[in-house]
Image (cartoon, coloured by chain):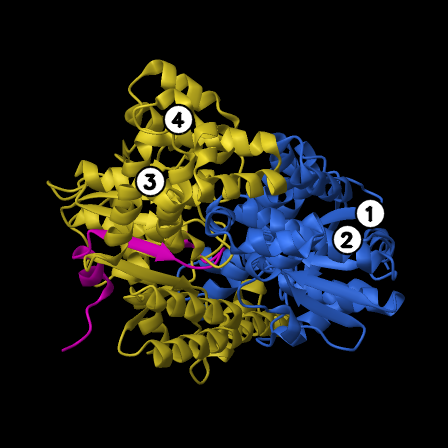
Amino acid sequence: MTPPDLAQLIDGASLVVCLGSGGVGKTTLSAVLALRQAASGQRALVLTIDPARRLADALGMTSLTNDPAPVTSFAKMHPDGALSALMLDPTATFDHLIGILVADPERRATLLGNRFYQHLSRSLAGTLEYMAVERLHALVKSEQFDRIVLDTPPTTNALDFLETPDRVALFFSDKVVRWFLPNTGKPSGGWTSRLFNRAGSTALLLLGRVAGEEFAQETATFFGTFADLLASFRLRGVEIGNLLRDKRTVFLVVCAPDHNRLAEAKAIDQRLREAGCGAAAFVVNRVDQAFVPAPGELESAVERATVLLGGTGERDRARAFVERLENVRRAQESAAAQHAAVVDELRAYARPRSVFTAPLVPAGQSARASLLALYLGLFAETPPAGIEPAVALAKAARAERRGRRVTDTQ
Amino acid sequence: MRAETSHLLNALEQRQLILVTGKGGTGKSTLVAALATLAARRCERVLVVEFNATPRLPALIDGAAVRAINIEADQVVGTVLQRLLRLPAIVSRVLNNRVVRIFANTSPAAREMIAMDELRDVVERSAAENCPVIADLPASGHALSFLDTPRAVRDLLRVGPIAQVALRAEQLLLDPARCEMVVVTLPEELPVNETLELVERARQLKLACLAVVVNQVPASLLDPDDRPLLDALHAQDGPGVGRYDAPARQHSEQLAQARTQIERLRSAVKAPIIELPRCAQPDARCCVDALVQALSA
């Protein structure tokens, strides 16, 4: 059996999680994958955490918000397909969550005003990851979308993200909160009543000793107010963990063709495997390619440049010019060779899993052109039905270049 | 040597802590290794610090003068608590209390604060021996959260031992005579966008920005007159320079793009901008050497 191509792989996945170190092009790739799913008739959503304007530009939108917004700039998609995009706003997500979970306005106000809560939701490191999984969970539950592509935060090791659900579950686990909770039946007892619980009082005193009495009390108040939410938070943590381990969830490790990124991609895969959900495939982005000149190709270029420059008197100038072009080609050739070596090494490591490559998109193009070029580079063999005139144009340009190459070498 | 570069190298010698950050994939670790090599020419000893699950710096540094350490919250929590509480009996009670342990492991900022206090301690001990510390921080967004941790923790706790610890870390980070930040970027649109945001947020946090280093600036393989010539050949009927056209055009676009992005940085950022050449070697060690050479030229 041949391994599935990228289109097959993502078409069957209800959740695609793109992981990789920073700067490898995860965000654009995520958008392209969701676009492909939409083009094949799915209601697809790309959930990004990258606040860069470029993705909004590429999708033809003025801005992205914390709510899924339809992407309408790709005309004539599949009749059943639709693409939506969302940019995660951790604070809004957290506040929204509290809005849903705490019905009583007074209790909600108390909670939103609690300093422990404010820091948890606004300024402390790790909140982005907490909220990304929370938002993901809510979207999956809503069943608004058939397919979700998640662009993960560029964490140091890209995998704090994976451990977050377990950490959330643990954070809100009985072990931590039991002794913070008011006694049932005596809700006014507050955290002080827990001082009569031996284990709890020890922990509280120790926490007070390390972090200050005031903090211990604020924390106790926070958990006290949170009492009703704990069960749902725990449940969410467990459900998210299950979702990430579901067989219709596909992890893609995205990588750039250099040795550092290769090592990081392997490390990410190792951690994924330890967590029981290894990468389904790898994508190496920005792989350069170079042509090898045919015999006489350089000479004919010199000839034509000589003519343009004004005839045989200019042959030396034309030769120097074409030699500089040849230097550019050689630099590209050596880059391409290095890239190919990285791809080969990753293939050997990944076997039997697939390693897909995406071409280097030339510099200086618009965000939208880069996105479409990446789409073509990845899914050239399975073009979606009339996805957009721009794609058709880009394809035509490619075909033309290919045709020119053929005529050149003849 | 250019004024910006010598300013940077002097700071390496005079400050206790140089923080290096930037978008992922811009070559932070390579630059940290190069800066450490240069600092070691002026100081007897230099320490580089990273906060990675998989340490990268040991493979990039060279020579007995530069030492590398890796700070991981899990590893140093005992040391940090020991400093905080002083009484070993209480430390072990705290460490052995399951509730406190889970809380410390899962509560946001707890791990960051532990790593931050360890960094502060390492810096103060190194400063006593005239050994500058160069920290290879996580990528921009995370680096800022990390650097903002002492303020956030102090805001949250106000009083108590941890608030004291946070205050000491904050005093180190915000003292421009002791600590400055170097931001690494690439001459491309997205990294420059992120850098402009990072520099602005660092200014809001009152962190001193020593320099912005533009890494991997491509060298031109073409003459300035070549582009019009290419365009003229391209516009003609017929094959022109054939397959040589596309790569040359791409190269020229890339150079133009790099210049545009560097100009954007220069017009928006007050800190000195230092350009460093792209290294074509696949070997990371060679790239460190190339940066050292470029910085000392």
Check disc 2 and give the amino acid type.
Leu
Marks 1 and 4, how far apart in space? 43 Å
Label 1 sits on a secondary structure element that is loop
- Residue A134 image label: 3
Q: Position of residue A396 (x, y in %)?
A: 27, 55
Amino acid type at circle 4 is Thr
Q: Which residue is mark 2?
A: B17
Mark 2 or mark 1, which has the lower sequence index?
2
Observer able to see residue B10: yes
Give percent across and percent down for residue B29. 63, 63
The answer as to whether the residues below labels 2 and 4 share one chain is no
Q: Which mark is residue B19?
A: none
- Please say if the residues under marks 2 and 1 sit with CB atoms less than 8 Å apart: yes
Q: Is residue B286 above or below residue A113?
A: below
Q: Is residue B211 among the parts visible in the rendering? A: no
Quarter-of-image position of residue A250: bottom left
Marks 2/1: CA–CA distance: 6 Å
Label 2 – label 3 distance at C-alpha = 37 Å
Q: Chain of mark 1?
A: B
Q: Which chain corresponds to the colour blue?
A: B
Query: Percent from the top left, x then y, of residue B82?
Result: 68, 55
Magenta residues span A1-26
In front: A217, or A337? A217
